[in-house]
Image: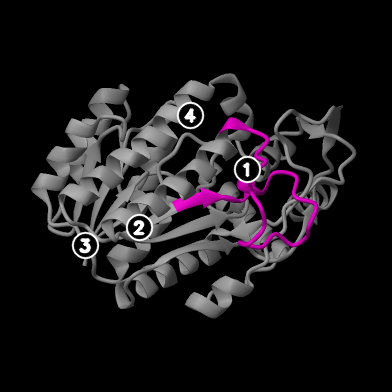
Amino acid sequence: MIYLVTGGSGFIGSHLIERLLRNGHSVINIDNFDDFYHYQIKIKNTLESINHISDFEFSDKETDIQRLITLSQSDKYSLYYQDIRDKKGLENIFKTHSIDMVIHLAALAGVRPSIERPLEYEEVNVRGTMNLWELCRVFDIKKFICASSSSVYGNNEKIPFAETDNVDNPISPYAATKKCGEVLGHVYHDLYHIDMIQLRFFTVYGPRQRPDLAIHKFTKLISENQEIPFYGDGNTARDYTYIDDIIDGIAKSILYLENNTNIYEILNLGENQVVTLSQMVTTIEKTLGITATKKILPMQPGDVTKTNADITKAKALIGYKPDTDFQNGIKKFVEWFLRKRH
């Protein structure tokens, strides 16, 4: 199979590509190496995902990315430095390759930044996604997996969150763009018979996690004996989901799409465990053997108080079975973090 993966040099995308290549598939990776976090991190992700052991000498962004493209090309893997807002650039890629399925993970991420830059989030997460669907329509590609987010649930009072819950009340532009993607995705399924699964990811963590996200940021700060930003009273809670379980869920979604037709499904991919902010910090402290210094701050606009996934549907439909408890997941992450740092 030939899979096009958008955002394939990011956290989740690089792990997925690693799995697909290991299973003998061909992969086209589209990534724009956005400055949301440092491009060198994405280069390292890419090299890890294709199992290319290299002492990469960094110089400047444009030169480094072009060298990465040359270095990584093979008969099973192609990398394109491409923004999904550029439909003409995307079209050239679709013309060059015979694509069996699109797995769309690229997005401008982050709740708080979306409040500051809402129009840019709309351009990337809505218009960019529609560019892909339009090209799937033109090139008759009938299989599509799309990354949604648990943020669409907003401050849903019903716990745990189920796919049938009303999600008409997002509380950030980021969440609204993800809800928009689900609604527009159904349009393309209905009009053009594109089989589609929308995956609502619940707070993914693990090796290669973005450095701006809490677990990575807190681990770095605590290990350096710096104070951590601690929002609220510590009772906000998340359904933290280990990266291996997310990749397993995506892989099983791929298999389900390949073996079925007339599909439009929304699935929660979470761990079905709730961990408070205080518990998260305590777990990192114990794993590192260092006590954190907390800077207590007020709750931030757009932050939800609690996320908790009902994964009954994903278990029944695709056989999703997460099996990494939080303590073990943090242990694996901290081991990777310390190894990477040295």
Residue 216, which numbered label?
1
Say if the magenta span includes residue 145.
no
Residue drawn at the location 85% of the way across and 33% of the way down? 294
Residue drawn at the location 72% of the way across and 58% of the way down? 308
Tag 3: amino acid: Asp
CB atoms at circles 1 and 4 under 8 Å apart?
no
Task: Check disc 2 and report the residue beneath it.
Answer: 190
Gap between marks 2 and 4 measured at Cα: 25 Å
Mark in front: 3 vs 2: 2
Tag 4: amino acid: Tyr
Gap between marks 1 and 4 measured at Cα: 23 Å
Magenta portion: prevailing SS class: loop
Residue closest to the eye, 333 or 325: 325
Mark in front: 2 vs 4: 2
CB atoms at circles 2 and 1 under 8 Å apart?
no
Task: Check disc 4 and report the residue beneath it.
Answer: 121
Task: Check disc 3 and report the residue beneath it.
Answer: 100
Q: Which residues are magenta?
A: 147-173
CB atoms at circles 1 and 3 under 8 Å apart?
no
Gap between marks 3 and 2 measured at Cα: 19 Å
Sequence-wise, the earlier of marks 1 and 4 is 4
Q: Secondary structure at mark 2?
A: helix
Tag 1: amino acid: His
Query: Where's residue 181, x and y in %?
Result: 45, 44
Q: Is residue 275 left or right of residue 75?
A: right
Q: Is residue 203 left or right of residue 260?
A: right
Gap between marks 2 and 1 measured at Cα: 40 Å
Sequence-wise, the earlier of marks 2 and 4 is 4
Asked where in the image residue 216 lies, by quadrant, the reply is: top right
